[in-house]
Image: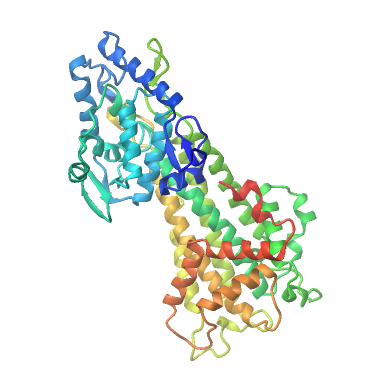
Amino acid sequence: MSANHNFNYGSDFLTVSKTIAISKGTIKGVLNEETRRKIKESSAIVEKIALSDKAVYGINTGFGPLCTSMISSEDTKKLQENILKSHAVGVGTPIDDEISKIMLVLKLQALAKGYSGIQEATLDRMIWHLENDVIPVVPKQGSVGASGDLAPLSHLFLPLIGLGRVHYKGNIVSTEEVLKEYGLKPIGLGAKEGLALINGTQFIAAHAVKVVARFHNVLATADITAAMMLEGLMGSAKPFHEGLHELRPYKGNQHVAANIRNLLADSEIVGSHLDCAKVQDPYSLRCIPQVHGASRNAWLHLKETLEIEINSVTDNPVIFSEDLTISGGNFHGQPIAMPLDYACLAASEIGNISDRRIYLSLEGNTDGVPKLLMRETGLNSGFMILQYTSAALASENKGLCFPASADSIPTSLGQEDHVSMGSISGRKALQVIENVERILGIELFCAAQAIDYHAPLKSGKMINAVHDYVRSKVEHLEEDQIMYEMMEKVIEMVKDGTILEIAVNAAKKEGVANTTIFTDLFENY
């Protein structure tokens, strides 16, 4: 891979998209010579402190409430191994290995800044794990998101000292087994290294990386499914007028309104009822820019906050020089725990309003569109029960929206007396997004059925392309059938980004002007 495609840990600016690319191996993360110099200097400072009589937290003292216990220079290295062993107390099923990879990338970026006293060899071994797809197994529960994500990060780095388990060649195996295969020995941790490895917000931040990426797809796809439903239910295009949103110029609202205008452009269906007697639509159609837009603003807030976080030094203590080490609180997860809770609520609202549009599509109040989206109901239940599923998912999301960051339980004998619970914020947000992906899939299924009843009238170019793709995979229905396999197909179209890709490609092909799907503010992360 050419140098132009390398990412320099510690010196280059890390984004969500770059993080995912490094974790997938499409960009190679490296340590350049300047970064290696800083790492060596910081490590040398820590070694000097470890040999001195000056008490510095975590280098020659115990941890947490044991911070007043001095540790001899002979025992400092044993201390670092002990902290990994004693803090690896996570429980529950393992997180996806993709998130474990992202944790490694984020930790490499933070440690390579040169303020942590980490050994060069330790970072090289972390890079080796990524490049050889030997990914530590990390349980999903156990972090309170304050003194770093202590438990998950301990599990992440047990393999450095030859312990723990790893994902390898599709299986979960012991680290010892893999190191033996490669002829490698465990790393001998130096002073402070164990503490540097497990102090930090990389578990929370790794989940936030996935939230930013998946939520972006959800937001863009929600605009598409909403526009399709607007077509199917012959809703008005007036609420998306540019002038209206200039009077209340939130970035998200304006973006969504422009998206809907572009999606509806040249629609024969919209043109067919411009002079109808209907005065206004229900809020779930009329207020799409206000609701989707508010969620987009929340996404943007999380993205901007996360970019600060993943380019920061979040361990403790921070090493500035031999004379200046600071035991502060950069490991505390509150700065991203709260935006994650905000994003969780914002994602839930996308599912909530989508469920309302699904319900509208079943009422039979639109000319030409039958009740329950089938012509002959009674014998047939039609699409009735799909909305039960979307309602169940929407309700589950509401229960998950209680902000984890509103809670705090003191730990470490009161030394860590306020914690963020951000690890729970991240996990909940991903669960909500997964549920919303399913709700949007159901909306897509229902909207495609509603649009069918307006033939031979056509939708706008982008919606036509999406509708044609859905119909290539799932047929129009006029009698009851087992639907769950069809539902899974349309849900997968949403989850894997196919729907967004089809709409974007259609826009490019048709030369749609001013397509805000492509604006830097919301497209690039």
* Nearest to the observer: residue 183 or residue 387: 183
* Residue, far top: 53
Figure label count: 0
Residue 493 lies left or right of residue 454; in this view the side is left
Q: Where residue 396 appears, x then y in whole percent?
A: 43, 60
> Which residue is rendered at x = 40% and y = 25% of the image?
36
* Residue, far right: 275
Question: Can you see residue 487?
Answer: yes
Reply above or below: 303 against 376.
above
Q: Where residue 56 appears, x then y in whole percent?
A: 31, 15
Colour setup of the view: rainbow
> Which residue is rendered at x = 58% and y = 79% of the image?
449
Residue 506 lies left or right of residue 88; in this view the side is right
> Which residue is rendered at x = 69% and y = 47% of the image?
250
Quarter of the figure with residue 414: top left
Q: Where residue 40 appears, x then y in whole percent?
A: 36, 21
Quarter of the figure with residue 275: bottom right
Residue 91 lies left or right of residue 223; in this view the side is left
Reply above or below: 38 against 177.
above
Question: Can you see residue 421?
Answer: no
Q: Where residue 369 appears, x then y in whole percent?
A: 64, 82
* Nearest to the observer: residue 104 or residue 335: 104
* Residue, far front: 2
Q: In the rendered view of the protein, which quadrant contains the N terminus?
A: top left
Reply above or below: 373 against 212.
below
